[in-house]
Amino acid sequence: MRLRIMTKQDIPAGLRLNTLSGWNQTAVDWDRFLANSPRGCFVMEDDTQVVGTAATISYENRFAWIGMVLVDPEYQKQGIGTQLLEKTIDYLDHSHIPTMKLDATPLGKPIYTKLGFVSEYEIERWILKRPPRAVSTTPRSTFARLTEFQMQQIFRLDRESFGADRSSLLRSLCDETPELAMAVWQSGIPECFAFGRRGLFADHFGPWMATSRVAAEKLLREFLARSSRDTLIVDCIKSNPVSVESLAACGFVLSRPLTRMVRGRNAYPGRPDCFCAILGPEFG
C-alpha cells in the first residue's frame, strides 16, 4: 500500500470509487478539488490500483473542507479511510489552516469525533424522482445567463453568508451549467441566489440562499423548471423550516441525515441561517 498525492491522471480512478459508492460526483467535481488544492488531495494505492481517496478544498485559508473520503468496497475495514483522513488533517495542520470542516454521515460521525471534530448543525438530504413526462424540455437558451456584474454581486453576498470567498468554485458551476445559476433581485441588488450542477445521476441544487419564504420558493420552482433530469438532490439545513417545508411540498422525500462538524476554532462561521441548502457535503 502507498499513500500519495492525487493527480489529474487519477480522476478516472476517483470517479470509479464514487460510482461504486453511489455518489453523485463527476470528473468535473474531481477536477475542482485538484484545481483548488493540487497538493491537498490524496489516494491510497495497492500496487498500481487506486483503492482509496480523500480531498481538501481551502477557502481563503480561513477554513478548509475535507471530502471524498472513499474506499474500494473490497478494501474496506482495513483502516484505509482513517489513514487518508489523518493525512488530510496533517496536511491542513502543516498548511496553517486553523479550521477544518466536513459533513459526516451517522456511520462516520464517531470516527470524526475521535479525531477532534465537534458538531455544528444538522443537514438533511432530500431527493425528488420525477417521471420523464414531468421533466422540463425548455431549451437552455431561453434562460438569461447571469452577467459578470451580477455574478460579482452574488459572490459578495455569498462571502458574507458562507464566511469566506468561494467565487472560483461558484464561477465554475455557473460556467458549466449557467441555466442553473439564478437570483432574486431587488432594485438591482441580489436578495437571494441559488446554483445547481449536473451530477453523475442527478442534478444537485445548492447553494440555495434565501431570507424569505417567497424568494426561497421562487428559486426552487425555477430550479425545477430549468433542470432536465428526473432525479434531483438538495442538501438542506435541517433547522430552516422554509427549505424543509418547500421541498416536501414539491414532492421531495428525506433520504439521509448529515452532521456538519468542525475541528479547530470556528472564527468564520458565516450565517448558516441565511441558507436553505448547502453546495454539497464535499464542498460545504
Image: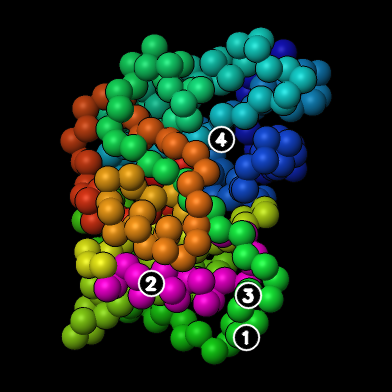
User: Which residue reaches farthest right?
Assistant: 48
Which of the two discs, 3 and 2, sits closer to the camera?
3
- Give the overall secondary structure of the magenta segment: helix
Residue type beneath disc 3: Ala
Residue type beneath disc 2: Leu
Numbered label attached to residue 124: none
Helix, strand or loop status at disc 3: helix
Is 231 in the magenta? Answer: yes
CB under 8 Å between discs 3 and 4: no
When the figure is inspected, residue 187 is found, relative to residue 69, above or below; the finding is below
Sequence-wise, the earlier of marks 3 and 2 is 3
CA gap, disc 1 and disc 2: 18 Å
Helix, strand or loop status at disc 2: helix
Is residue 151 at all visible to an observer of this figure? no
Sequence-wise, the earlier of marks 3 and 4 is 4
CA gap, disc 1 and disc 3: 15 Å
Query: Mark 2 sits on what residue?
Result: 219
Query: Mark 3 sits on what residue?
Result: 134
Helix, strand or loop status at disc 4: strand
Q: Which residues are magenta?
A: 214-233
Sequence-wise, the earlier of marks 1 and 3 is 3
Q: Residue at x 54, y 53 (%)?
A: 127
Q: Residue at x 81, y 18 (%)?
A: 47
Which of the two discs, 2 and 4, sits closer to the camera?
2
Is 264 in the magenta? Answer: no
Residue type beneath disc 1: Pro
Q: Quadrant of residue 202?
A: bottom right
Label 1 crowding class (10 Å Cα cut-off): few <14, some 14-19, many 20+? few
Query: Mark 1 sits on what residue?
Result: 139
Which of the two discs, 3 and 4, sits closer to the camera?
3
